Image (cartoon, helix red, strand yellow):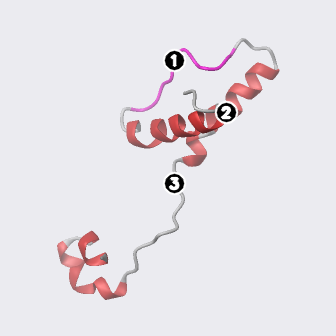
């Protein structure tokens, strides 16, 4: 129920809110950017190959960007991360 998702001061307004059920992961676009970088570097023979030796991201991104990067990588590479 929406009431369970709202902060206490808004629980009385739960009837005004509808929980979204069709929201795409907002991290998908940045999480799949690795594919474009790898494809571009491999096709131009710049020495980048898959999988990468190093993956850098901000310390606040572990749950978002890294998770979506891992999932899109596994899906795009037939189960290999």
Please give the name of the residue rendered at 46% of the width and 35% of the height, measured from the top-left corner. 66
Q: Name the residue under label 1.
A: 54
- Distance between the Cα atoms at labels 1 and 2? 15 Å
Q: How many marks?
A: 3
Q: Where is residue 1 in the image (x, y as percent from the top left)?
A: 30, 76
Give me the disc on residue 11.
none
- Name of the residue lying farthest toward the right: 44
Pointer 1 with pointer 2, Cβ within 8 A: no
Q: Is mark 2 on a helix, strand or loop?
A: helix
Q: Is residue 77 above or below residue 44?
A: below
**Mark 3 or mark 2, which has the lower sequence index?**
3
Give me the disc on residue 35.
2
Give the main secondary structure, helix, strand or loop, of the magenta stretch. loop
Tell me which segment is drawn in magenta: 48-58
Q: Is mark 3 on a helix, strand or loop?
A: loop
**Mark 3 or mark 1, which has the lower sequence index?**
3
- Distance between the Cα atoms at labels 3 and 1? 24 Å
Q: Is mark 1 on a helix, strand or loop?
A: loop
Q: Position of residue 52 (x, y in %)?
A: 58, 19
Determine if the magenta segment contains residue 50: yes
Q: Mark 3 points at which residue?
A: 25
Position of the C terminus, as image quadrant, is top right
Q: Which of these two is toward me, 63 or 81?
A: 81
Instruction: Bin the neighbour count of mark 2 within 10 Å (Cα to Cα): few under 14, some 14-19, many 20 and up.
Output: some
Q: Is residue 63 above or below residue 79?
A: below
11 left or right of 72 in image? left
Q: Where is residue 51 in the image (x, y as percent from the top left)?
A: 60, 20
Determine if the magenta segment contains residue 72: no
- Distance between the Cα atoms at labels 3 and 2? 17 Å
Q: In this view, does 15 lie above or below 74?
A: below
């Amino acid at each position: 129920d929406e009431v369970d998702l709202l902060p206490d001061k808004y629980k009385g307004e739960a009837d005004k809110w509808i929980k979204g059920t069709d929201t795409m992961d907002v991290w998908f676009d940045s999480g799949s950017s690795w594919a474009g970088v790898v494809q571009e570097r491999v096709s131009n023979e710049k020495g980048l190959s898959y999988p990468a030796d190093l993956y850098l991201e901000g310390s606040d991104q572990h749950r978002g960007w890294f998770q979506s990067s891992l999932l899109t990588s596994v899906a795009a590479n037939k189960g290999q991360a």
